[in-house]
Image: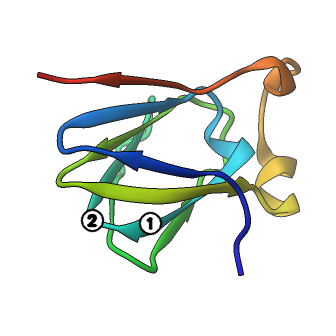
Amino acid sequence: MVQGPTVSLPPRQLFELPDAASARILCTAGCLWVTIDHDPRDVVLHPGESFEGTAGRRALVYALEPSAFVLAPASQRAIGHAHGRDRARRTAFVWGCA
C-alpha cells in the first residue's frame, strides 16, 4: 500500500509539484492530467494508476473532474535520476483555475 498525504482537487484545480522526481502520484479518484516542464509526454491517470517522474523538473497535476491522489515518496530509482541540490527545500503549491 502506498502511504503519504492525500490531495483532493475539485474540477479544473491545479497542483504544482516543484520536483517530479521527489514523489509518486497515485490516483485514487477521478481523472488527473500530469505534465512535466520540458517533457513532451502528457500522462492521464485514472484510479489505481500512478506516475513517478525521473527528472528533477516541475510537474503540474490538473484535475479533469473531482479527483484525489496520494502523494508518496519516490522510489530510490527516481530519486537517483533527479537533478538539483535544493530538492529537499522545495514545497508544493495548489491553486484554482477558473
Label 1 sits on a secondary structure element that is: strand
State whether residue 55 is above or below residue 73. above
Binning the other alpha carbons within 10 Å of mark 1 as few (below 14), some (14 to 19) or many (20 upward) gives many
State whether residue 61 is above or below residue 47. above
State whether residue 60 is above or below residue 80. above
The amino acid type, in three-letter code, at marker 2 is Gly
Q: Which residue is mark 2?
A: 30
Q: Residue at x 17, y 54 (%)?
A: 65
Name the image quarter holding residue 61: top left
Binning the other alpha carbons within 10 Å of mark 2 as few (below 14), some (14 to 19) or many (20 upward) gives some
Q: Residue at x 23, y 54 (%)?
A: 66
* Residues at marks 2 and 1 touching, judged by CB atoms closer than 8 Å: yes
**In the rendering, at what x and y percent does residue 45 appear?**
35, 66
With 76 as the anchor, is 6 left or right in this view? Answer: left
**In the rendering, at what x and y percent does residue 38 appear?**
44, 30
Camera-nearest residue between 33 and 39: 33
**In the rendering, at what x and y percent does residue 15 appear?**
42, 34
Q: Quadrant of the C terminus?
A: top left
**In the rendering, at what x and y percent does residue 14 appear?**
33, 32
With 75 as the anchor, is 69 left or right in this view? Answer: left
Q: Which residue is mark 1?
A: 27
Label 2 sits on a secondary structure element that is: loop
Camera-nearest residue between 62 and 81: 62
Q: Residue at x 27, y 65 (%)?
A: 30
Name the image quarter holding residue 77: bottom right
